[in-house]
Amino acid sequence: MVAHHRVSRTGPLAPVGCPEKPRGASRTVEASSQTRGSKAQTTIGDVLRWLSSLARDSYPEDGLYRGSPSTPLTGILLCWFANAGAREAALRHNLNLIVTHETPFFETPSRDPGCPPPADWLANKQTAAFYDNHGIAVARYHRTLDAFCIPRAVGAHLGFPPPSVHEGHKGYEFTLVYDLEPTPFEQLARQVKEKMKLPAIRLSAGDGRRTVRRVGLGWGGVSLSANLQYMELLRQHGAEVIIGGEVDEYALEYYRESGMDWIELGHYATEAIGLEQVARELGATFASTPLLCHKDSQRLVFL
Ligand SMILES: [Fe+2]
Ligand SMILES: [Fe+2]
């Protein structure tokens, strides 16, 4: 299966920014999924059921990590990563459910015997204490949302046509290949940088004047070396350029050795667009519930 920040599908969307402040006024709202005729309060479980209904398969990493489904809902914060900024925003706006795309607690696929278990790591202990002390619940929806819309949203945002190749498994597409008008690589890179409104992007390219036409999508963490098998599938489908979220230098060597150019737009940046679509649909479903789609900041500094 596709590992961690990985793989995944939707229709085109018109990108819309997240609201800066929670939308919706009331703290207690009428249930949207209650028994007909009743006016019970909306609970955290109602939101979880709606999110789970988006899944195209079962994804064990998705669901509630802290809190109780029966807790009445005061509001929702949707974010890419439930980091300190997101947690504090939830607290500040009295939103008692955080829905995060990435894991709420740091994990490791294997552990050296000398290393304590992740639950004992400083960052995880601090995060657990936050949820316990403030009565805020946190749920993760990872592959559910990747399968629902995240990669397709990036392609649509970049103005690409529907993908020529879209293959995958467990309900979502991790092999997405787009055929574009023949374009010099450097021009394509400038176009996508502008579409994403990014101040800087990283590239790995041979001749910037080289004409490219077939692009593979490696959004989020899919273009990292941990997922090279999926990049090799893109190459087999003729991708000349990978447009990725983030990359490590080991993976860069793979791209170079495989004759592919590479464009990095950022893990957060390439997943935030799809999360905005989820926020719009979540907001339409729970129309009276305060909802904040948290905008993170890229904290890398370039000197
Ligand atoms: Fe990711
Ligand atoms: Fe993702």
Image: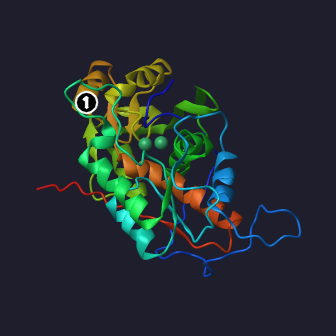
- From the top left corner, tell me how far across and down residue 31 is, in percent: 74, 68
Q: Is residue 129 left or right of residue 166?
A: left
Crowding at label 1, few (<14), some or many (≥20) Cα neighbours within 10 Å? few
Colour option used:
rainbow
Residue 84 in which image quadrant: bottom left
Which x, y percent locates residue 181?
50, 39
**Side of 254 relative to 141 (left or right):** left
**Rendered view: 208 above or below 131:** above
Looking at the image, residue 72 sits to the left or right of residue 220; the answer is: right
Where's residue 161, x and y in %?
58, 43
In the depicted structure, whether residue 225 falls above or below residue 53: above
Regarding residue 180, the answer to whether it shows in the image is yes
When the figure is inspected, residue 283 is found, relative to residue 161, above or below; the finding is below
As drawn, is 278 to the left or to the right of 242?
right
Q: Residue 119's x, y, as percent?
A: 33, 41
Q: Is residue 17 visible?
A: no
From the viewer's side, name the closer residue of 94 and 241. Answer: 94
Please tell me which residue is depicted at 40% across the width and 53% down the height of the picture. 81
Dividing the picture into quarters, in which one does residue 172 lie?
top right
Report the residue that reaches farthest toward the bottom: 25
Q: Where 76 sits versus 138, above or below? A: below
Q: Secondary structure at mark 1?
A: loop
Image quarter of residue 89:
bottom left
Q: Which residue is mark 1?
A: 206
Q: How many marks?
A: 1
